[in-house]
Image (cartoon, rainbow, N blue to C red):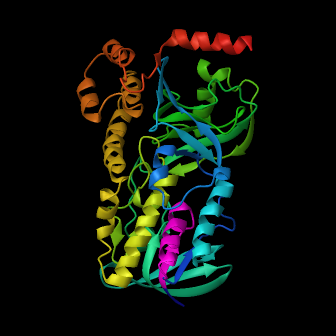
């Protein structure tokens, strides 16, 4: 079987790439090893509204199940609330959302093959894939593509078959997460992010999906004990205890993510990577859904230019970096590097430094200079910080007590 483009992976990145290729008239096949798209869910399902203007297509309102006005960050009994366009979010239901994104590709003319596993590549000179062998619903098939788009996630078979998959300690982080119901959310319209010794090389989160439902989890880059233990300790901190007192676990949404690159570059021969396979998630939150759609679209359009106009696939990375989302990746790379350096600290002040970083209270350059300050100086740095635009509210333990009293009265 011959085609112009074989897309491996039908998540948001792969579906977006397939759509762009099909819209340009290329014979496009996109495959996925799952029998149903969107399941199982392995993420918190949050997306940033700031990326909406950059999307190649509009997301219908029915796909956006809950809006959030910002994020509350917690560390060492300090709460920082960030608001404004950069911090607004929405929650989606991946079981529906991923199918909807894939439908944009099939409606454009791409052929979707589920229950289809990539088995092998016949690779020629300079990593040029001549033939791909796949197992589709128990049958072996061979596809000869002009270009392969690798959109198969953190455990990319595409990269492994090319011999280009790289992994070291901390490259793949573990996430233990549950959708929980009957949650007494302190701030239903704010996402919550926590750093502390309940996950010393990561963070914990509460992403609301309604007034009384939320995806709650912990992520850890270098776990030293079972993830369930980190999760249990997180739920025991005072700020969480009253929120989950009567909550019930409904669905396991844990999994793995790659907060560090698993590939040295985005293009190998006639193979172009997108999504998590290309480390196209934004740190510190490893936010990947909308960046995947945007970058998948750019991967598809770069592929179109390569096949139709003989332009080099290597222009892809520059195309992304020159796009409006490019500055996000520049900041993400710097943030990710510093975040991992802070993970290796053993002093409790590292949680204050992490709060400064993930809440974007100071630049990574400034935080590096603050690493040598003592705990109380860092605490004062946070408590006296002020955002002149958003008038961000910074509250201490007294506010936690005040909020708890309000909740108790209701």
- Residue 401: image quadrant is top right
Residue 381 is situated, as x and y percent measured from the top left of the image, at: 33, 17
Question: Is residue 14 within the magenta segment?
Answer: yes
> Residue at 42% across / 31% down in the picture?
359
Question: Is residue 321 within the magenta segment?
Answer: no
- Residue 298: image quadrant is bottom left
Q: Is residue 32 above or below residue 121?
A: above
Q: Nearer the viewer, residue 173 or 306?
A: 306
Q: Visible in this render: residue 364?
A: yes
Residue 160 is situated, as x and y percent measured from the top left of the image, at: 44, 69
- Residue 338: image quadrant is top left
**Left or right of residue 253, residue 376 in this image:** left
In this picture, which residue range is highlighted in magenta? 4-25
Residue 152 is situated, as x and y percent measured from the top left of the image, at: 51, 65
> Residue at 53% across / 28% down in the picture?
198
> Residue at 67% across / 41% down in the picture?
178
Q: Nearer the viewer, residue 174 or 253?
A: 253
**Left or right of residue 54, residue 235 in this image:** right
Q: Quadrant of the C terminus?
A: top right
Q: Is residue 356 above or below residue 55?
A: above
Q: Across the whole image, how many numbered discs are drawn on residues? A: 0
Q: Is residue 389 above or below residue 220?
A: above
> Residue at 46% across / 28% down in the picture?
82
Q: Is residue 184 above or below residue 106?
A: above
């Amino acid at each position: 079987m011959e085609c112009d483009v074989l897309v491996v992976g039908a998540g948001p990145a792969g579906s977006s790439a397939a759509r762009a290729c099909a819209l340009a008239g290329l014979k496009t096949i996109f495959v996925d090893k799952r029998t149903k798209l969107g399941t199982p869910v392995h993420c918190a399902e949050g997306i940033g509204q700031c990326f909406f203007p950059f999307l190649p297509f509009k997301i219908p309102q029915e796909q956006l199940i809950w809006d959030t006005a910002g994020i509350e960050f917690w560390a060492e009994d300090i709460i920082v609330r960030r608001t404004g366009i950069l911090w607004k979010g929405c929650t989606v239901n991946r079981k529906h959302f991923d199918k909807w994104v894939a439908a944009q590709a099939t409606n454009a003319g791409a052929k979707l093959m589920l229950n289809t596993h990539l088995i092998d590549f016949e690779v020629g000179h300079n990593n040029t894939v001549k033939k791909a062998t796949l197992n589709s619903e128990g049958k072996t098939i061979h596809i000869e593509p002009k270009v392969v788009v690798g959109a198969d996630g953190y455990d990319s078979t595409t990269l492994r078959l090319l011999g280009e998959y790289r992994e070291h300690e901390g490259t793949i982080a573990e996430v233990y997460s549950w959708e929980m119901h009957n949650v007494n959310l302190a701030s239903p319209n704010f996402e919550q992010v926590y750093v502390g010794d309940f996950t010393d090389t990561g963070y914990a989160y509460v992403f609301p999906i309604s007034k009384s439902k939320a995806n709650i989890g912990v992520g850890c880059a270098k776990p030293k004990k079972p993830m369930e233990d980190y999760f249990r300790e997180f739920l025991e901190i005072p700020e969480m205890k009253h929120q989950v007192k009567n909550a019930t676990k409904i669905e396991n949404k844990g999994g793995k993510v790659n907060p560090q690159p698993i590939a040295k570059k985005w293009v190998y021969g006639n193979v172009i990577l997108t999504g998590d396979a290309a480390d196209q998630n934004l740190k510190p939150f490893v936010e990947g859904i909308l960046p995947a759609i945007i970058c998948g679209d750019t991967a598809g359009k770069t592929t179109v230019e390569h096949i139709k106009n003989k332009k080099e696939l290597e222009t892809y990375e520059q195309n992304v970096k020159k796009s409006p989302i490019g500055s996000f990746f520049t900041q993400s790379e710097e943030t990710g590097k510093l975040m991992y350096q802070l993970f290796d600290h053993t002093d409790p002040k590292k949680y204050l430094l992490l709060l400064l970083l993930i809440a974007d209270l100071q630049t990574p350059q400034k935080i590096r200079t603050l690493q040598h300050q003592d705990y109380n100086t860092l605490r004062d740095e946070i408590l006296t910080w002020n955002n002149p635009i958003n008038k961000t509210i910074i509250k201490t333990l007294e506010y936690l007590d005040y909020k708890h009293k309000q909740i108790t009265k209701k």
